[in-house]
Each structure stands twice: as structure tokens, then as C-alpha cells.
Amino acid sequence: MVLLNLFKVKELKKKLSVGKRTLFLITTMDLKSFTSAIAQIAEERGILPEKVIETIEMAIAAAYKKEYGEKGQMIKCKLDSESGEAEFWLVKLVVDESMIYSEEELEKLKEKKEEKGPSSAKSSTFALRASADKSAGKEKIRFNPEKHLMLEEAKKIKPKIKVGEELEVSLKPEKDYGRIAAQTAKQVILQKIKETERETIFEEYKTKEGEIVSGIVQRIEGRNVFLDIGRAIGILTKEEQVPGEFYRPGQRLKVYIVKVEQTSKGPVIFLSRAYPKLISKLFELEVPEISSGAVVIRSIAREAGFRTKIAVESKMEGVDPIGSAVGQRGTRVQAVINELGGEKIDIIEYSDDPEKYIANSLSPAKVLEVKRLPKNKALVIVPEDQLSLAIGKEGQNVRLAAKLTGWKIDVKGARAGETESQTEEQEETDKEKKDLKKQAGRKKSEKSLNSKTKNPAPETLFRCGTSPAPCFALVLGLKLIC
């Protein structure tokens, strides 16, 4: 039996040269060494030993077909790892007259190819197949004696066989293979091992979606950063990077696996450093109470690279959720902050009471009173000196609190010791004062207007007779006859 030394395994380096042919004979090898070589290949490639044996069987079958078979044949091989012997079968599909094209249909197909040209040969074939026996729900095929076998002939070999089943005809095992057959087997093994390895990597990382892994920056191409995450290379796109964070080759980072996609070039693993769930996964690694379920992270609001708010809740009596997340002297939360490059993290306690939850979410600002308004809005009253702290730089604190709670939050300041009702009364008083000022302004303007009406300008109102000039005598109060 032939086996190629494709993986540079010491146990598979035994050759036998005959003229221009180079053969690898399992019959001349120790089966124990062969089994250990298979195990070594499987371990290096990260695939199952059964997959390696299956690949070798396909390669031997391809070599057999190249050397002793015909074009179009389907040859199957089964390798016995205990005895080292291989068995071969020729596989044929059993068909009947209704499944194959007739001579007339083949002639029509040939005529259509000649009329439409070679470029439309595929489309005409598909059209002819689509118009074939639709009532039976089957597509017709072109009969090939190397691939197909009529039902009558198949029943002579296996009486109980049915249409659509495969018939396996045993073939004579061969041990002598040429250079071309050996090269074919080599290409099959390399291709199949690579495909199997890609499938294994895809399945492995597909199950890790939503988890964090540790990676090493391998290279930077444009705006994309490629990280070595073990058996594969992940990509960190510009959108998933933290603003202001710089990366260098050899740097070790923890990243979040967003999704895994299978492509023609292998699996593509998309990573993220800005995803909010990265925070919760990092806390699971640092806080045993969170990983065990005693403390639960209910909500996360994050502006990557600047600030994050998380709401925690205790599921076990006697466990302080904030204290557990912070750790002794802040060691646990500081470890997460260091991993994120100094990003600020606010840890607040979750509450089923919306008012209390909203008040907690504005931490570190102190809240005097919270009033719920229609349309999922809330009015928060804070001390005057805490107003800027509650709003935050460029509104960041109140914005994150709104994301965390899901409420639209308005923040207003009040003097120390004042309640919301007192604030409203003060607002009403201020409003009344403004109205009084407006009324006083209106009265003053009306008074000035009246005074102007009582003492009109002489050049516009007092004229004598038909003279266009003003009568200054009347203005002076003189008793003159015009």
C-alpha cells in the first residue's frame, strides 16, 4: 500500500526507489510506527486522527484511479489501520430510463448548443434539465457507463437494489503506483488536510463567539490590526478599535470575538476592543462572584476609551455587589482599568425601583429628588454645586446614565436643602416677578405714548387757515385772530 511522506514525519520517510518511481510502502512499515505517525500529524494540525486516515484513504483512491482507473469513475478506498491492508470499490449510481436523457433529447441539446454557441452551453443545459420530468420531481442526467448502471444490470449483482442507490463493485488491490499517481495522491492529501484544518478552526472559534481571548499583535496593515489568537489570525478593524489607543507588533491584548465567517480563503475572525460586553467578560475573569453567578451585571453603557458605567446586582444574600466588583483596595476594578488603558469605570447598584436606579446611575453626583414624567422621561434635581458633576464633561455622565437605565433624563440644579416642590414654587415666584416686570414695562410705554398724544408736535397738528406754516401763536397761548 502507498503512503506519501507529506508531513516530514520521521516514521514515514522510508522509501523504495524503482526506476523513475518512488513508492512508500505500508507493507514494509511497522504498523505501530504508522499509527504513531498519524497521531503526530493529527496533533500538529489540530484535527482528529480519523480525519487524517479518511484523507489518506481519499488520496490512495485518487492514486488508484489515476493509475488503474478510467476517467469519470468513482473509486472508494478503505484502509485497515490494524492490518495495513486497503480495499477498493468502484461506486456506480443505479438509474432507470426515466432518469436519463433519450437520444432525441440529446440531439435537441446538441442543436441548441450549436445555435447559441459555446458560451450559452451551460444555460441551455440548465434549461433542458429544468424542463425534464418535473412530475416525478427528478432531474435527468446524461448516462455515463463509468458512473451509472442500469437497474436491470444492477439487479444481476444485487437483486434487492433500488433506483437511486449506489452499487459498490469490489476491485483488485494494487501496490505498484507510478510517479504521476503518487503526485496526485500528494495533492489530494495536502488539499484535504488544509480543508479539514480550516473547518476545524472555523468550528472551534464559532463556538467562542461572545468570548474574550488573548492575542498578540502580529502586523498592522493600514487601519486594520491583525492579532495571533492561537490557531488563527483575527482582524481588529478601525471601527472596533478604541479611540486614542495605539498598537505595536508584539503587544499582548485581550479582545472580544464578535463573529466568525467562513470564506474561500478560510475562516475570518472579527475582533473588538470597543464592544461593551468586553467589560463584562473582563470582570468575569477578575471577579469570582460574577463568574459564579452570585453577582450579576445587569446593564452596561460605554464610550470606549473614555468612560463606562455598569450596573451590578447581588443574587445572594449578604454579598455586596459593588464591593465584590471593586475588590480589596480597588484591585479588581483596577486590573480591568489597566487592561483598557486607563478607561474610567463607574460601578453602581441596580434597583428595580426606577427612581432609585436613575439616582444611582448619576453617580458620583448626589441626587436630591427624581420625578418620573410621561413618555419614559425623568426629571432629576441635584444640588447646585453638583450640577456640573451630574451632567459631566460635554454631558457624558448624564448621557451614559440615560443609556444605562433606558430613561430620558433631565437634570436641574437646586439650592442646598431645597426639595422639588420648593424649586417649583421658586420657579413660579420668578415667573410672577417676570410677569410683573413685563406689566410695569407695558404701563410705562403706554404712559409715555399718552404724554406724546397730549402735547403733539406743532408742525403736524396746529395750522391756521390754509397757511402751510404752523400757527406759533396757538403754541405760545396767545389770543390772536387768524
Image (cartoon, rainbow, N blue to C red):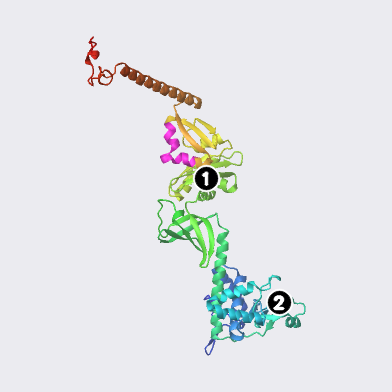
Front of the two marks 2 and 1 = 2
Question: On the image, numbered disc 1 is attached to which residue?
Answer: 300
455 vs 130: above or below = above
Residue 198 found in image quarter: bottom right
Asked if residue 399 lies in the magenta stretch, the reply is yes
Dominant SS type (magenta): helix
Circle 2: residue type: Ser
> Residue at 31% across / 19% down in the picture?
452
Q: Earlier in the sequence, mark 2 or mark 1?
A: 2
Do the CB atoms of the residues marked 2 and 1 lie less than 8 Å apart?
no
How far apart in space, not on screen, are marks 2 and 1 (Cα)? Answer: 64 Å
Quadrant of image for the C terminus: top left
- In front here: 107 or 259? 107
x, y percentage for residue 64?
61, 83
Circle 1: residue type: Ile
Circle count: 2
> Residue at 36% across / 20% down in the picture?
446
x, y percentage for residue 216?
46, 59
x, y percentage for residue 419?
49, 26
Q: Which residues are magenta?
A: 385-401
Disc sitting over residue 98 in the figure:
2
Helix, strand or loop at mark 1: strand
Residue 88 visible in the shown view: no
- In front here: 121 or 33? 121
User: Going by the picture, which residue comes out furthest to the bottom?
Assistant: 19
Asked if residue 479 lies in the magenta stretch, the reply is no
Residue 454 visible in the shown view: yes
202 horizontally vs 428: left or right: right
